[in-house]
Image: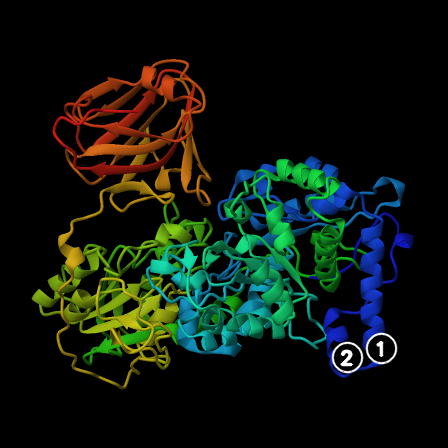
Amino acid sequence: MRRGLVIITAATLLAGCSKFSQVQQSSADGSQSAQDDLATEEARIDDLVSRMSLERKVAQLIQPQINSFTAKDMRRYRFGSYLNGGNGGPGGDEFAPALEWLRLADEMWEASTGPLPNGEPAIPTMWGTDAVHGHTNIVGATIFPHNIALGATRDADLVRRIGHATAIEIEVTGIDWNFSPTVAVAQDDRWGRTYESYSEDPAIVAELGAALVEGLQGEIGSEGRLGEGRVISTAKHFFGDGGTEQGIDQGDVNGDLDDLKIIHVSPYVSVIDAGVETVMASFNSINGRKMHGNEAMLTDVLRGELGFDGLVVGDWNGHGQVAGCTVSNCPQSLLSGLDIYMVPDDWKALLETIVTQVEDGVIPIERLDDAVSRVLRVKMRAGLLNENALKPSERSGAGNMTLLGSAEHRSLAREAVHKSQTILKNNGVLPLRDGAKILVAGAAANDIARASGGWTLTWQGGGELTNDHFPGATSIYAGIAAVAAESGGAATLSENGDYRERPDVAVVVFGERPYAEFAGDKRNLLFSDEEGLRLLRRFADDDIPTVAIFLSGRPLWVNRELNAADAFVASWLPGSEGAGVADILFGAQPATGRLSFSWPESCDGAPVNGPKGALFPFGYGLSLSESVNMPSFDETCAALSSGASLEWFASGRLADGAVARSAATDLPQLRGASALVSIRGIDRNAQEDAREIDFAAGGNLALSGPGDDQAFRIVYEVTDRPTAPVRINSGESTYDATLELSVAAGKGWREMTLTKTCLPKLTNTLKIESDGAFSMRIYSIVREAMERKAECSF
């Protein structure tokens, strides 16, 4: 960060103040100078607030996303901050080059700092981003292992260095603020955000979370804190996000408050001591009360008990989940202690509503001024309210492409990978011997996106991403091949496991497909994808020793794979530097990774946070010198006999085995565009959990997936009547649904049931085609067995 501010004229501001780090350090010494500095800081803030109009004050609390407003809007309203969503990018291009992100940062900075009339101060905006394992929105950035892997290292210094490297790469693109670290203490591994947690142990979360804050911002008392190569950090999500019932994202956390605080609040003590400047409110509720409207937690606990004096920012439309609120009308959140509303798309309506509520006395002006002051205080500490402002492109490191994905940062990421690899089983096959002929199998072996997980270039990760999206990165296969060649051996890639020349050993890379947030929630802990199991058993039948490399964002029930493999490595989600995996396989680095989560003995999903119910306990992990002949593990799992899920689309993502196309264009995760169809993510109950599908005349959307003759149950919405015939096809059956969709128009979300009554030759395909321009929204698509005579309905 840095740096200075242009506010109307220099005369409108006092001289630039000292760094907050220096103020806080000297305050600890009890000096008169510290008190004077703090008084000067507060005097400057009070002066700025006193000269701001009501609308400009409210705008400081509004945080829209980059794809829902323009520089003209910024110049008109002067938002205090803005963000890029997980699928957002400059000009709507989430793969835009780094310099385009920097150009947009300049554009918004200049729009926010242009002169205002009547001596009103022009407060610079700040840009927030989710750089949760490196600056992973940017093509070419270093992708570090996710937090669950870093928890296995127990290495706070490593995490601190990762934070600094991430901040340096963020600064290349002119962004000010990182929504990280996540300091959730995940207690139920069915939760789709488990990989964002360092550990089930709050002590590990506290230590590593504080280290990342220090890496991103600099340490308190250090000269460069929040200076060059540093950014504002955010501890999230306050509090209890990792403790929801059944691991349901954004769900309920219940129990004795003091007991909950011991687990879920303790990391915030550490990050606040480390100087974290912002805290993000959580989606979840505590004993039935949503955190975005929980004054007892946001004000009494966070500010009162913990002494936090930074700003509290909301999560994506989280205020809209508060009882009695909508995304455009929620005074409860501000009154409860929220300072910034993250309101991606409905920013204008919310801004206007808050202005009216202040004018009407619903929101006291004192509370508004307090929230604005907190925003300005963070900007001041970050150097954004100093004189001699520098726009983003003029700051140190900005636009320096040699810093993005630099060799130094990639080496650091490789170190993090090898330190996090956790060996669960080794019958003596590891380390691999020099000169070995190695077969590397599995669809994930040469797939950098699979190794990186969610929050990688896109919100959900994976999908349409190929290795071409990761210049400078190294897949797990490529890393193994390079190290094998150095040792006099050779590695051959065969995703399906076929080989002509018998290998000495087979390395099978498999695991979870990428996901983020609620899209990763599970009903149980069964790892059901059997690709890796088939390969391991095939090689065992051929008497070829095997090493299993398991990619996952959490511990899962893999007893079958453990039994089939000679060695088993929990690789977590290692990111862009696959050579770090090879470092462990070949013994080039010691195996020091240890479980920061208990590994489940059962597949049923019951929380395991200790030795009871653990196949491998917290803290377990073998060194390369330990060769253990393990017993055969129980392969009984009730979920194995329940059959594959027949969900095609739910929680904002296509299920495994489901495919979407329009004409000849693949539409991964049911988003993207063909010549005649465009699909984008929209919010129904959560971030981008639904899709809006726009058909041009002659456009069609075709889906296929599991199931044969089961009915389709589709939750959908039509806002405007079709302008021409709309047909639904399955197999050789066609049904003209124009009338039914016309009746449904404007009536909100509805349920469509398609059975053999209207589609007599219904199969595992579904196509919607429109002869004219037509738009519809889809929330879920499920195959379901119904009675033979079940009617179709809309």
The amino acid type of the residue labelled 2 equals Ser
Q: Residue 33 got which mark? A: 1
- SS for callout 2: helix
Q: Are marks 2 and 1 in contact (CB under 8 Å)?
A: yes
Q: Position of residue 787 (x, y in %)?
A: 13, 32
Residue 783 visible in the picture: yes
As rendered, which of 12 and 463 lies closer to the eye? 12
622 with respect to 123 (left or right): left
The quadrant holding residue 572 is bottom left
- SS for callout 1: helix
407 with respect to 491 (left or right): right
Q: Residue 26 got which mark? A: 2
Q: Is residue 658 above or below residue 741?
A: below
* Crowd rating for badge 1 (residues with CA inside 10 Å; few <14, some 14–19, many 20+): few
The quadrant holding residue 574 is bottom left
The quadrant holding residue 21 is bottom right
Q: Residue 562 got which mark? A: none
* Crowd rating for badge 2 (residues with CA inside 10 Å; few <14, some 14–19, many 20+): some
As rendered, which of 380 and 241 lies closer to the eye? 241
231 with respect to 620 (left or right): right
Q: Position of residue 357 (x, y in %)?
A: 69, 41
Quadrant (top left, top right, bottom left, bottom right) of the C terminus: top left
User: Which residue does the image show at 22% across and 31% down from the upper left?
Assistant: 765
The amino acid type of the residue labelled 1 equals Ser
Judged from this view, the residue extending furthest toward the top is 724
Q: Position of residue 575 (x, y in %)?
A: 41, 62
User: Which residue does the image show at 49% across and 70% down from the upper left?
Assistant: 261
- Rounded to the nearest angstrom, the CA distance separating label 2 from label 1 is 8 Å
